Amino acid sequence: MSDTLARIGAYKRADTARRKAQTSYADMSAQAHTAPPVRGFLEQLRKRQAVDGLALIAEVKKASPSRGLIRADFNPPALAHAYEAGGATCLSVLTDTESFQGADEHLVAARAAVALPVLRKDFLYDAWQVAEARALGADCILVIMAAVDDALAADLVAEATHWNMDALIEVHDRSELERALNLPSPLVGINNRNLRTFDVSLETFESLSADVPADRFLVAESGISTPDDAMRVKHSGAGALLVGESLMRQDDVTAAVRTLMNFA
C-alpha cells in the first residue's frame, strides 16, 4: 500500500468512526430507504457500449493529492449538465474532503441535476459507508482492492448488493485483479496509475485486461485524454472509460466529452 493510501485510510477510518457515533447504522439505513430510486449504473454502461462500442464515466473532481487544484470554477450541477450534454453515460463524484476537496453535497447536487447514474468516488472501509452512499443517492460504490483485504471487500460488495447498488472493483496490478475476480461484482476497473510512483501507463490496462473473463465489464481508469487513448483501451477490452482530470481542465467540458468519445 502506498504512503498516500495509508494516510487516507487512517483519516478516513477515523472520520467514519466519528460519523457512526453520530448516526447509527439503523438510522443511516432509514435514510437510505428514503433516498431516490437507484439508477442502474452497470445497466446503463452496458446499454451504451452495445450502441456506441464504448461508454464514459465522467468525473466531477475539484482537486487531487498529486495535482492539487484541478478546477477553480467548480460547480457540480453545471458540470453534471455539461457531461450529460456531451454524451457521458454515468458520473463519478468525489466526496472525500481532505485529499480531493470533495463533499457529500457535491454528489447530491450533481445527481439531482441530471438523469445519469452516479458513482460515489471515495475510500470505503466500512459497510456503514455504503449505506451512507445510498442515503446520499449514489447508484454505485468504489471498492479499492489496494486499500482493503478480501473479507472487507466482500462485505462492501454484499452491502452494495443489499441496496441494489453496483460496485466498481478497482485494481492496479495482477495480484489485485486475481482477488477482484473472486468477488461477485462483474464491474472491474483497471487503474493505469501506479500507486507508488504515480506514473501512468496504458500498458497496465493492456496487460491486465487479457486475464479478465468475458463475463466481466471492464472500465479503463486514469491516463485517458485523447480519442487515440480511448480507442487503444477499447481494443484491449474496455467497455467504458473513467475520465476526470483531462475533462475537468477544459473550458468547454461538453465539447471535450464529444471530442474524446467521437460524438462530435
Image: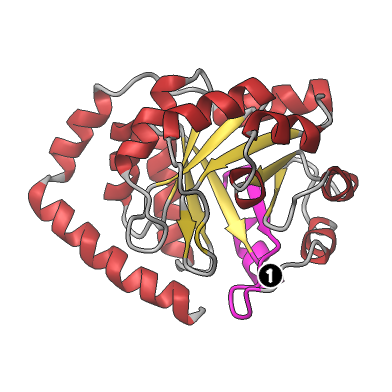
**Residue 37 lies in magenta, yes or no?**
no
- Asked if the magenta segment contains residue 186, the reply would be yes
Magenta-drawn segment? 172-198
| Residue 45, x across and y down, in percent | 67, 30
Q: Which residue is painted at 39% across and 36% down in the image? A: 107
Identify the element where label 1 is drawn.
loop
Quarter of image, res 179:
bottom right
Residue 96 shown left or right of residue 148 in the figure: left
Mark 1: amino acid: Asp
Location of residue 99 by image quarter: bottom left
Residue 168 lies, in percent from the top left, at: 56, 46
Location of residue 218 with respect to 113 vertically, above or below: below
Residue 62, visible in the rendered structure: yes
Please name the residue shown 22% across and 67% down the image. 14
Residue at position x 60%, y 23% in the image: 84
Compared with residue 109, is residue 201 higher up or lower down, i.e. above or below?
below
Of residues 54 and 211, which is closer to you in this image? 54
| Most foreground residue, 44 or 112 | 112
**Display colour scheme:** secondary structure
Determine whether, in the image, residue 233 is placed left or right of residue 221: right
Judging by the rendered image, the residue that carries numbered circle 1 is 173
Which quadrant would the C terminus be assigned to in this image?
A: top right
**122, above or below 11, in the image:** above
